[in-house]
């Protein structure tokens, strides 16, 4: 497929940005520990033994160690009853030694994720999913921001990406990424002040919408869904997706790709996130920032 070319694209390197932020977080965490006698403490509940979820949680635990946080990993069997899980959450809500905690998604099919989200104390909801935090985000009040959208904002800020007055298209409308991302990019702040369009799998003539984007943020959950003909020259492209694609040429038998077809889209972009190493590290770092905020409060 032929695509027009622009000047050489630059990477929005989430790994590099994350490392810089971790240094700042570690310094702040040391001050919190000196002031109150204990380090910020994050706990994660992992239900079952899903490989991807286990990898994510282990990465979060490692990140805590890197910045001087305490971390607790609570492993629960996949067969745990919903009420028993809610009881465990209630205990964490009242644990004065714990600043924040997450329940790793997805959950087994017999557990209602909405009930779980509502059961978490909003003051310890460092994932930023509780309705109180979501509502405060919409109103511009102090809150814990959802980790992935917040991480994307930090990444745009780190690379001084101009956002005011820009056309931003968000592809995907989930409560975890797409919807809060649209809210943050439209707010009167930096990054923000964009004119935002939210598109999704049922958007008619999606390519005509994405081609309008100065800033294109893709979180649709489909491998290499956005192709070169769907992006205008010079766009800033943020790829939230990560997928394993079978590839016999690789030692592991697969390769990692995003929701964006990198080889086609990158030459048309001014800035683009790599996969892996783009949004992923920033999500974990945002979780650390929320935990630091909880500890500081």
Image (cartoon, grey):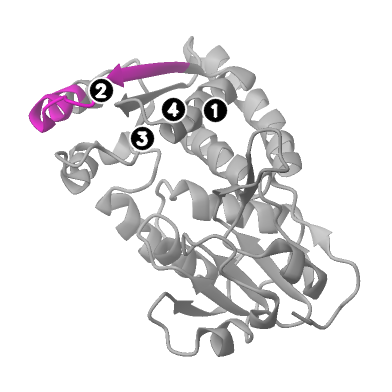
Q: Give the spatial CA distance, label 4 vs label 1.
A: 9 Å
**Mark with earlier residue (2, 4):** 4
**Above or below 153: residue 173:** below
The residue beneath circle 4 is 54
**Mark with earlier residue (2, 3):** 2
The residue beneath circle 3 is 104
Q: Is residue 165 visible?
A: no
Q: Residue placed at 25% from the left, 22% from the top?
A: 92
In front: label 2 or label 4: 4
As drawn, which residue projects farthest toward the front? Answer: 248
Q: Residue placed at 24% from the left, 21% from the top?
A: 77
Q: Is residue 121 visible?
A: yes
Question: Which stretch appears magenta?
Answer: 71-88
Q: Position of residue 144 (x, y in %)?
A: 41, 46
- Secondary structure under tag 4 reads helix
| Residue 114 appears left or right of 216 | left
* Badge 4 vs badge 3, beta-carbon distance below 8 Å: no
The residue beneath circle 2 is 92
Q: Residues within 10 Å of mark 1 (few under 14, many from 20)?
A: some
The residue beneath circle 1 is 59
């Amino acid at each position: 497929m032929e695509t027009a070319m622009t000047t050489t694209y630059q990477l929005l390197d989430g790994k590099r940005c994350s490392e810089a932020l971790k240094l700042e977080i570690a310094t702040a965490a040391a001050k919190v520990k000196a002031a109150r006698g204990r380090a910020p403490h994050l706990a994660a509940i992992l239900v079952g033994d899903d490989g991807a979820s286990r990898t994510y949680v282990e990465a979060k635990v490692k990140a805590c160690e890197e910045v001087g946080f305490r971390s607790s990993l609570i492993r629960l069997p996949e067969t745990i009853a919903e009420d028993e899980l809610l009881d465990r959450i209630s205990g964490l809500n009242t644990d004065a030694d714990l600043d924040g905690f997450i329940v790793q998604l997805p959950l087994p099919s017999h557990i209602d994720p909405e009930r779980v989200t509502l059961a978490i104390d909003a003051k310890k909801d460092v994932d930023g999913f509780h309705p109180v935090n979501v509502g405060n985000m919409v109103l511009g009040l102090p809150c814990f921001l959802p980790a992935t959208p917040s991480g994307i904002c930090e990444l745009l800020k780190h690379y001084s990406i101009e956002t005011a007055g820009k056309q931003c298209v968000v592809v995907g409308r989930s409560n975890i990424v797409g919807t809060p991302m649209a809210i943050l990019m439209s707010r009167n702040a930096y990054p923000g002040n964009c004119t935002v369009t939210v598109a999704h799998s049922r958007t008619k003539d999606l390519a005509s919408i994405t081609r309008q984007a100065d800033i294109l943020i893709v979180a649709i959950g489909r491998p290499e869904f956005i192709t070169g003909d769907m992006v205008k020259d010079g766009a800033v492209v943020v790829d939230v997706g990560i997928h394993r694609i079978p590839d016999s040429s690789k030692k592991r038998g697969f390769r990692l790709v995003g929701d964006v077809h990198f080889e086609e889209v990158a030459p048309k972009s001014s800035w683009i996130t790599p996969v892996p190493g783009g949004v992923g590290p920033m999500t974990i770092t945002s979780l650390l920032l929320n935990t630091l905020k909880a500890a500081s409060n």
